[in-house]
Amino acid sequence: SSRRRRDSADVIRQTFGSLFGATATLSAPPAEEQDGDEEDEDEKRRREREERIRARLREQVRIGAKDDEKVDIEVEQSHVPFVQVFSQQGIEEMGMSDLQNAFGNLMNRTKKVRTVTVREARQILAEEEARGLVDHDAVVREAVERAEQSGIIFVDELDKIAGRESGHGPDVSREGVQRDLLPIVEGSTVTTKYGPVRTNHILFIAAGAFHVSKPADLIPELQGRLPIRVELESLTEADLLRILTEPRNALVTQYRALLATEGVELEFTEDAVREIASVAARVNQQSENIGARRLHTIMERLLEEVSFSAPDLEEKRILVDAAYVRERLENIVRDEDLSRYIL
C-alpha cells in the first residue's frame, strides 16, 4: 500500500511537471495565503451585504417610503449677497453667482451641509444636476435673440414725464427723461450684463392716465415714435364682475383662502358678487376712478370685521349675500365724503 501511495505521488508530480515545465512538489499553502484568502472572502461578503442594503434602500426611496426621513446633504450656497457694479449704463446689481460665472474658477463656490427630508433632498439634487446640464451661453444667446426679434416693452405712467400746459414744475427734468427714452424707442444698442441688445425691432407700448397733461405735451420726437393712439374706456359693472369671478386668483378666491387659514369657511352668493361690482362701479363714478383697484378697498372694508375676529368666531361658516354687502357698505356709499376717504 505504501508503494501504491508513492506511485500515485510520482504520477501527480510528473503530471504537474509536464503542465508547468518543471517538477512540481505538492505542499500545503503558507499560513499567510490562507489568511489572505479568508480576508478576501470576508471583504467580498461585506460588499455583497452593502450592495443588498443599498438596493433595498434605493427601492424604498424610489417608491417614497423614506420621503419623511431626515438626511444631511452638501449643497452649494444659493443665497448670496448682491454687490453694485459700475457699468456704462450706471450702477447695476450683480449677484455673486454672476461674478463666479465671469471669473470662472478663480472664486471657490461655497458649500454647506443642510438637514432636509428625503423628498426635499431629491428635489435639490435634481435641480443641481439639471443646472449642470444647461448650456448657459446658449440660453443667453437665444434669450438675447428673442428679445431683439420678439420683445415687447411696456412703459407705464408715461403721463408723469409729459410737460404741463401751465409751464410750472420741473419740466426740464421731464423733458430730459423723454430724450433719454427717445434713442431706445427709435432703435439703438443697449448694453446689458448679458451683452449688447439692439432695440430696432422691439415693440414699445406706452400708457398713462393723462388726467392733467395730454399726449400732445410730450416732445414731438417721442410722439412720432408712438404713432398709434388708443383711448381706453372706464371699467363697467360687468367688467368688474368678470374681474371678481373669472381669474384663477380672483379676489373672492383670495379672501376665501385667507380666512380658511383661520378655520373660517367663507361663501359668496352670486347676488353678493354682483352687489360688490355694483358698489365699486358707483364709487368710481362718484369719486376718483381708480378702476379695478377699487375692488380691493371694498372687499377689505366688507370683510374687515370678520378678518379681525376670525380666530375667536364661534360660527366658522360665513355666508356673504347681497343683504350682507348692503348692510356694511350702503351708508358709506351714500355719503360721498365718507366713500372718498374710506373706499
Image (cartoon, rainbow, N blue to C red):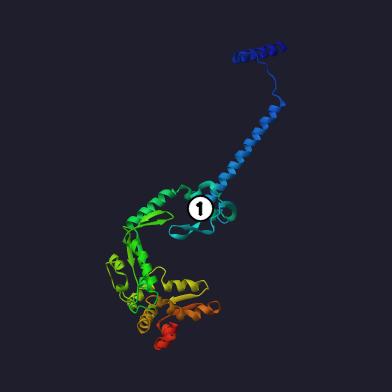
134 or 325: nearer the viewer: 134
79 or 169: nearer the viewer: 169
The image quadrant of residue 39 is: top right
Position above or below: 223 against 202: below
158 or 298: nearer the viewer: 158
Q: Is residue 69 visible?
A: no
Residue 306 on image: x %, y %? 50, 79
Q: Name the residue under label 1.
A: 99
258 or 9: nearer the viewer: 258
Structural crowding at the residue carrying mark 1, measured as other residues with C-alpha within 10 Å and reported as few (<14), some (14–19) or many (≥20): few
Residue under the point 42% across and 85% down: 339
Q: Would you say 209 lies left or right of 28 here?
A: left
Q: Is residue 264 visible?
A: yes
Position above or below: 342 against 251: below
Residue under the point 62% across and 15% down: 16
The image quadrant of residue 333 is: bottom left
Q: How many labels does the image show?
A: 1
The quarter in which the C terminus is drawn is bottom left
The amino acid on which the numbered mark 1 sits, given as a three-letter code, is Leu
The quarter in which the N terminus is drawn is top right
Residue under the point 59% across and 55% down: 114
Residue 178 on image: x %, y %? 35, 67
Residue 152 on image: x %, y %? 34, 61
Position above or below: 243 against 1: below
Residue 192 on image: x %, y %? 42, 56
Task: Describe the element under mark 1 as helix, strand or loop.
Answer: helix
The image quadrant of residue 28 is: top right
